[in-house]
Amino acid sequence: MKEFSYLTRTEDLNKASTSDFDALVIGGGIIGSGVANALSQSGISVILVDKGDYGSGTSSKSSKLIHGGLRYLAQGRIKLTRNLLKERNYLLEHSDVVRKERFDILVGKGQFRRFSIRGGLILYGLLGGGKPSRFIKNQGEYPGDVEGYFSYTDCVTDDAYLTVMNIVSAHENGAICLNYVSFQNMERLTGGVRAHLVDVITGAKLYVNAKVIINCAGAWIRGLLPGNAINPETTRLSKGIHLIYPRSAFPKGHSVAFRSPIDGRQMFVIPREKVTIVGTTDTFTNTPDDLDVSGEERSYVIRSCSFVSDSFDKVLPIAEYAGIRTLYGAGSSPGKLSRDFKVIADDISVTVVGGKVTDYRRVAFRVAKLVSSRIHVGRVSPEVPRLDYPGLPWHNDIESAINHECAITLNDILQRRLGTYYFDPERIEEVSNQIHEFLEEKNIKMENGFFIS
Ligand SMILES: Cc1cc2nc3c(=O)[nH]c(=O)nc-3n(C[C@H](O)[C@H](O)[C@H](O)COP(=O)(O)OP(=O)(O)OC[C@H]3O[C@@H](n4cnc5c(N)ncnc54)[C@H](O)[C@@H]3O)c2cc1C
């Protein structure tokens, strides 16, 4: 496999300003990385830039579920649920970074209703979700108000690493991918655009010519491309927070879906590797950088999850995170807006609004088809985007993170290559020391926090 590191990044910066591309992708979250991967596998020359690390936006801040969304089914969004389940099942089969997880969904006073959940789960199963359990009576494993529960299967992943796998796959297929390069502006040329970019590490400017520009900047899409008609009335931003507890706070071996006793919203408690992740909130915001967890948000999640186990009130969370998604459509609350994506195109640009982690392949395929018809290349295979990089599932390989997955800061490794921050935060210091030892051994230096030779 090709080297993909802080060293090749320097070479790629040179190539970027001396070549012309079919497509420039802004944003290396799951959507942009899937798009770049699909384009590179379709014979379309592509360059992708992200102002931070790959997956450092919302694509490392999700609930990390790969699912059809029982809640969407309850809203009557049958087609969306069917599509998501198809994607879930594809990813489960083709990626080691997606695995099955058992969920108990609680039934009783203030919770879900037994007969509607039973019906919903049967339909979910018919749409591709697998067979649910029969109704199981609460024998004391849940609070007194809970009559019982159904168990069903969905999937979990490491969202950030799935993003990195798509980036590496795109790189293997010839895409130029540059983390820490920010898109600033663009000018129109005959038959395309000239994008003005800045290398965030050195402050150097660079200019890239492309026939099509693809805006996959997630929560930052609004106002990015001049003249691009993203209507803030129909492109809303919604924020959600999660808290991370030690695994011992919830020693069950499976996840739980339940309603918050505060307002009836669906919540999840999800035991993962060495932790339990709980969440989430869902509130409109207007600023894509509103990424602090407020006291009010934290308290809402703690009070809601204490319904399932009072440990969440007694033990302190060891980490927390907030993410912001874009939602397309109008509605009085974020929960009512569809989680389906929307692709908006004009003569030189394509913008993606929304797009779940679960659904990234469908988005990428749709965009690749659109771009290939614009620039008259051949047919796009329904198989794209494939993962041509197998990744290292639940891995701990610092060398691969630096040499093959282009991690160029300590946090790139801890958060988005090894997943230590999310799945084993109590080992952050130990793993940081291991990284420092590796850097010393290989004579890799750091300047302003970035690796240099
Ligand atoms: C709380 C929450 C929970 C969720 N849970 C789930 C779940 O369990 N399962 C699921 O399938 N989906 C889930 N989602 C949805 C999913 O996480 C998002 O829809 C998805 O991650 C969006 O990916 P993206 O690539 O569009 O955005 P991002 O991951 O945010 O990527 C956009 C990228 O663009 C870059 N960028 C922005 N501006 C510029 C610029 N000027 N120049 C260069 N780069 C730029 C950013 O740095 C960023 O990396 C959840 C969302 C939220 C908010």
Image (cartoon, rainbow, N blue to C red):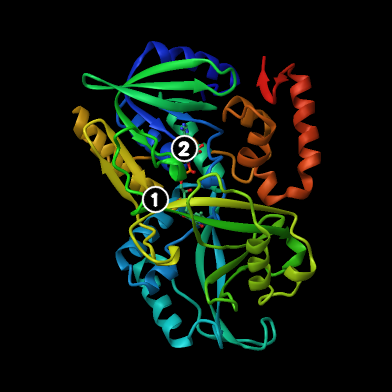
The residue at which mark 2 appears reads as 166
Left or right of 276 on screen, residue 176: left
Q: Is mark 2 within 8 Å of ligand 1?
A: no
Residue at screen point 39% across, 74% down:
74
User: Do callouts 1 and 2 mark residues in contact (Cβ within 8 Å)?
Assistant: no
The quadrant the C terminus occupies is top right
Please tell me whether residue 275 is drawn above or below residue 253 in the rendered image.
above
Residue at screen point 45% across, 35% down:
27
The three-letter code of the residue at mark 1 reads Gly
Left or right of 350 on screen, residue 360: right
The residue at which mark 1 appears reads as 354
Left or right of 400 on screen, residue 328: left
Give whichever of discs 1 and 2 has the lower sequence position: 2
Q: Could you tell me if residue 380 is visible in this image?
A: no
Q: Under tag 1, what secondary structure?
A: loop
Q: Could you tell me if residue 360 is visible in this image?
A: yes
Where is residue 171? Give x, y as percent. 45, 27
Please tell me whether residue 220 is drawn above or below residue 403 in the rendered image.
below
Please tell me whether residue 92 is drawn above or below residue 435 in the rendered image.
below
Q: Under tag 2, what secondary structure?
A: helix
| Disc 1 from disc 2: Cα separation | 18 Å
